[in-house]
Image: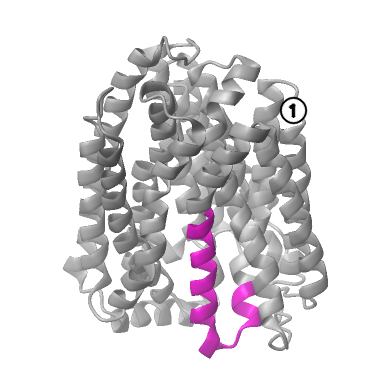
Amino acid sequence: MQAQRPAICSNPYRVQFALCIAVFLVPFMGSSLNLAMPLVVQDFALSAFTLTFLISGYLVGTTMFQMPAARLADLVGKRRLYLIGISVFGFFTLMCGLAWSGPTLIMFRFLSGVGSALVFATNMAILTAVFPKERRGRALGINTAVVYFAVAAGPFLGGLLAQHFGWRSIFYVSAFLTLMAIVTGATSIKDEWIEGKGEPYDYAGSGIYAAAIACVVMGFSHLPLMAGWILLAVGFIAGAVFVRLQLRSTYPMLRLEIFAQNRHFRLSSLSAMINYSASFAIGFILSLYLQYVLGLPPDQAGLVLIAQPVTQCILSPLGGRLSDRINPSTLTTSGMGLIATGLFMLAWLNESTPVYHVTLILVMVGVGFAMFSSPNVNIIMGSVSSKLSGLASATTGTARQLGQSLSIATTSLIVHHYMGDMELSLETAGLYLPAMHTGFLIFAAVCVVGMYTSASKLMGGGNSKEWRHVSGRLEAREGE
């Protein structure tokens, strides 16, 4: 069925403004909530182990449904699914602010993650559709800048809100911004994009995929309990069934041949997942360290934590430009090396470490992330044809979210090993330190593995012409 493709939008910047509000919300919420954790613990008497589910619950909801939502958007329309997603996100964000217990807060975070999955399955596709080719790079650059600005603003603004107005104010402010995104999106995005109108939706594949992702992430976070091993086994079995179904389906949810035939896409997606697995929990771990171990108030801890995202925001455009001139795999490998070094240094923090020392390490990690992120996206998007760019974008987002989920799950496992169900407080902060040290050492080792997968692309060349040949073969097969 021929896709419905409206003409380029007459006022794409209005659309971009609406999309940027949504793009701002999710990273802002995540990074600002880190600073509110002690207040949530105080209100609901949560254990350190349960506290990690505030982050992982949201990530599981997003990871489970982002890829299925990308396929659904091709069938029902990207605009429609985007507006549904941002509405779901806004409603359950408001409910988070009204939560009356720890379990209800975790549940509402999960459901807001489902809404976020619908938003991020459609956001980049709409942005690409409304801008002509000669202006898309700049538009995507603005989008990326907004993400890093949100990550940088979250700890500072979230710390101020939490300290002066309580942790619930973070959700109320985010819900208000979501209402703005809904109104501007509904009035600015006039066109609809339906790439696969009339094609059937792979309900079985989507359901099995979501179940496999949920079982793997939740199972990993519950190790070494027997329930964790059972969930992992179920997850891997469901994953094998999903792969078999996709290979036999005429209209699969996920085109698996892109992984089999495109080496650069495969390794770069894996590198992205490994990178986020190793680095995402840094903010969560250090927010607790700065407040419970060093005794900083939330607003001061937030000022320390913004060092990494500010560095990324400033240097990421430079990393992107460099990746157009030299082999981007060289940059991604070097960036992973810097992140691994920073993680190893974080493993030696203690009660007497100066705050400036923590800040300098975060700057180093930010430099490494800037060298990795933009060049790695350049490899992924440059390795596929334009017809597969939507799939590539969704795969990149899923790899990122899965890596983030595994990062928090690993942290949850380590904290539970050292602290059990004890409530985190100034009195138990001494038990938190060895958990933090172990976590950072493990993440540093994971980053070294990521250096290997990233460097593996160097062995196969890695220039843009080779990527175009690969994507051309996939596109030719798609047209058969």
On whether residue 92 falls in the magenta region, the answer is no
The crowding category of the residue bearing disc 1, from other C-alpha atoms within 10 Å (few below 14, some 14 to 19, many at least 20), is some
Residue 330 x/y as whole percent: 21, 67
Span colored in magenta: 127-150
Residue 182 x/y as whole percent: 78, 60
Q: Residue at x 44, y 22 (%)?
A: 229
Residue 299 x/y as whole percent: 50, 38
Q: Residue at x 48, y 52 (%)?
A: 152
Q: Residue at x 65, y 19 (%)?
A: 43
The three-letter code of the residue at mark 1 reads: Ala
Q: Is residue 283 visible?
A: yes
Establish if 166 lies above or below 266. above
The extreme left residue here reads 459
Q: How is the image coloured?
A: one colour
> Which residue is denoted by mark 1 in the rendering?
99
On whether residue 147 falls in the magenta region, the answer is yes
Left or right: 479 as drawn, with respect to 287 = right
Q: Helix, strand, or loop for circle 1?
A: loop
